[in-house]
Image (tube, rainbow, N blue to C red):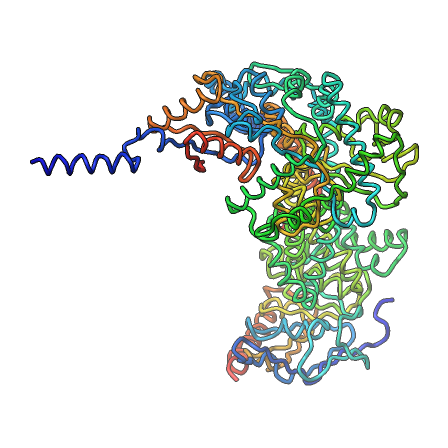
Amino acid sequence: MEGAGAMTLTVEHINKKFVKDASETIESLSDINMEVKDEEFICILGPSGCGKTTLLRIIAGLEHPDSGAVKIDDTVIDRPNQKLGMIFQDYSLYPWRTVNENIAFGLELHGVPKERQDVIVKKYITLAGLAEFGKSYPHELSGGMRQRVAVVRALAVEPTVLLMDEPFGALDAQTRNMLQNELLDIWQKTKKTILFVTHSVDEAVFLADRIVVLTQRPGRICEIIPVNEERPRDRTSVEFAKIRRHVLDLINQKCVLQ
Amino acid sequence: MGIVIQDNCSMNRILMTLASVKRRTFLKILLPIAIIVAWEVIAIVLDNQFILPRLGSVFAVLLHPTADILGNGNLIDNALISLQRVIAGFLVAAAIAIPLGIGMGRSETVHDLFDSLMQMLRPIPPLAWVPLALAWFKIGLVSMIFIIGMGAFFPILLNTLDGVKGVKKTWIETAEILGAKEHQILSRVILPGAAPTIWTGLRVGFGIAWMCVVAAEMMPGTNSGLGYLIMASYNWGQVPVIIAGMIVIGLIGIGFDYLFKLVDRRSFAWRELER
Amino acid sequence: MRLTVIALIAIALVLITAGCTQPAQTTNSTVGILYSKGVGPMPMLLATKQIDGYIAWQPFVSIGSKSGIGKVVAYSGQLPPDASNVNHPCCVLFATDALLASNPDLVTAVSALTQASSTYINDHPADAAALEADFLVGKGNFTYGNVTVSSVDVLNDAFPTVRYTNDPSPVWINGTKRFVNTQIQLGYVTSELKNVTGDQLDAKLFAFGPYQDAKQQLASGTLKTPKKITTPITIGYLNGDMHSAALAIALKKWQYFNDTYGVALKPRDATQTRPDTADLIVNGVPVAEIKLVGGDAGPQVMQMAATNVVQMGYVGVPPTVAAIDKGTPVKIIHPVNTEGSGLIVDVNAPVTDWKSFVTWAQQRSAAGNPLKIAAPGKGSIQDVMLQYALKDSGITSKETS
């Protein structure tokens, strides 16, 4: 069931401290509040170390905030929940499983019968454009191909929200651009809500409906910038450059030092 | 034109690979052959069968593996008996070490509970357990399995622990997010993820277990096996039998190591290519 | 001047009476004893000239002479001090106190079988030799270098040098107690048996009841059937040792003993060269399952007795005595043999008997290259006999490596 009703993901007053050695605590996230609407594409943008990955992991239920809560509608998310799928930067594919078997992983966990699994796997491997590579192993694929498998593996169990942690960071510029387009394509076809973490302004401006800009540590929401440009967006257009400029200025003036 | 060039390139590649394989094989058998030649030369020069028997006398034993040796049965039967014992001890060790290693790797509580005991027992050589094994388990297969098992246990345990700890966090988290329960994480992520390292532990553990066979079969009440054959031959000063026994032990050891490595190459190739 | 001469003569007289002017060789001759911890390596050590000779129990003396590696100097019964070593104690049958208390009739039956078997050996030495060769090494051949000797030939050569007797005669008892004293002097016996003499010593060492009963029953022709037990009894013996031949012959010719005497050890697996399980049958009734375990050395068998892994055993006097001294609860039932060891030297040595051996030892010692003779273990009968024989001939012995 895709996009079940109008879901809202709320992040309320999230605070997180990390204890370093010798009882030195570092404030990682400070009072994060945001509301994500159904089918939105949100980019979380910030410099390295600003806690954006931590925020994503808290939303995923992999880590606990010190205070505050994450909710989908009224359900509190305090542990991994199937409504939230996650794609890691290192793809995290299981190297001992073929592409088909990777995609089927989540289905296997829930005891989906084999015939049904095959149907679903076929659907998603086609969506990823990798239909001939079903029996290949991850180490036989390129970085871009592996990332596509990671995405459809997460999609196969039909989550409402996709959390993506700098998924294209390890790829070259050409592949990256291609995958960004493919991701938008998949997003439009499957109508998921996406939270996408990145430190690239270009990427954020190209992909997002709204950009959530975080400050340096301790990460606070500095600004949430809407990008109203229609898709497909032209990276070389004047409008694109203007928005880019605007975001960069904002970051440099307002969001660097707080 | 392009096709011809491609063929030449493939041809060259094949030839170079062949040459490299030939060269590697040559190097691998060079030293053993040199040792065999040197052995015979020295044996002839020394002319003393007790220091170094002639190759012929050792081969006389090896080439008659079905001949009875001083009422102790033949080479093949004794080799099989030793193998049975080693496999039994090895399996018992694996059955305990693998679950314990997984438990220690997954749970801090389990780890802390067992860690100091394991650290204490680890450096004790299996041979040192012989008197106690004999007193506790009396004469028979159980005491032998204990000795052999003690030899195999720690490599398997430590490698399992290592393998489990080495499973990528994101693999586990992916499974959690996809809805896996703890037992599913264990069977579908931890075990396959740790499998290559565990397999290495099994390979090393088997090698050590095989080394323990002589020690284990030295225990009184043993009247069969390669280790026993060697000791009995020592008793009667039959040096060629001792050396023949040692060679058989070595060959079987190589054979199993090769088998383990074969599985490693086939099933765990992904490990190398992941890193 | 005259005073000086008188003084010199006086000094010379003093020195002569003090014995300091005797030829240096005789008093300072030494022989090195190498403890090889077992007799297995001895033929090899002799053949590779790492030792000049060895003293060992049979059949290792015969192995040495039959394979041409060495020649016999003397068998143990002939070693000096003259006549004191004739019929010297060697191996015994022991039983644990627990077994003696719970099932003395079983011990009696085993003793009876042993006695019957010894009789057979003395009456049929050639057959016994073949059976023992079968038990020890499946009648196989020994190969030493280019020489191959048949084990049957070796045993045929060895059997006459061993006295198979089970009689705990006064001579034997005294010999054993003298041995204990030697052990005390050498410092190998230090606890339970030290400072114990007379009847107390006897009580600690011996339990001849079963022997007497068995002898009586054999003489009368009827044996008493022991009560049946369900737990197996384990009997230990030494691998490569022919002194316990009575046990081997009993196993190999069980039918004969069953038919002739009414007691037998019937192996359960007839194909085994050295059966590991047998049934003790008395008067046609199987009364106990007997497990047979071969150990590599006496102390190992005694350790098994201490942990109750074995309840009876055929071993040498020294390890039995040492065990009793340490508190192991066992008793000696009776001897299984006397004598049965020998001294053998390199085949090229200028030696034909003990006297020429002594001369050789003196010559080598004077030349700064004392003889190296291997013995099985510190405190063993062979070790003790060798040391005392050398001492009697004015040679000191010391451990060497």
Q: B201 above or below A217?
A: above
Q: In terms of depth relative to the viewer, which is nearer, B171 or B140? A: B140
Quick check: B140 left or right of C52?
Answer: right
Q: Position of residue B152 (x, y in %)?
A: 67, 47
Q: Position of residue B128 (x, y in %)?
A: 61, 48
Quick check: C13 left or right of B205?
Answer: left
Q: In the rendered image, which quarter is residue B231 located in?
A: top right
Q: In the rendered image, which quarter is residue A189 located in?
A: bottom right
Q: Residue furthest right?
A: C284
Confirm whether residue B4 shows in the render.
no
Q: In terms of depth relative to the viewer, which is nearer, C295 or A235? A: C295
Q: Residue at x 66, y 78 (%)?
A: A226
Confirm whether residue C350 shows in the render.
yes
Q: Residue at x 61, y 71 (%)?
A: A239
Q: In terms of depth relative to the viewer, which is nearer, B189 or C154? A: C154
Q: Position of residue B64 (x, y in %)?
A: 69, 19
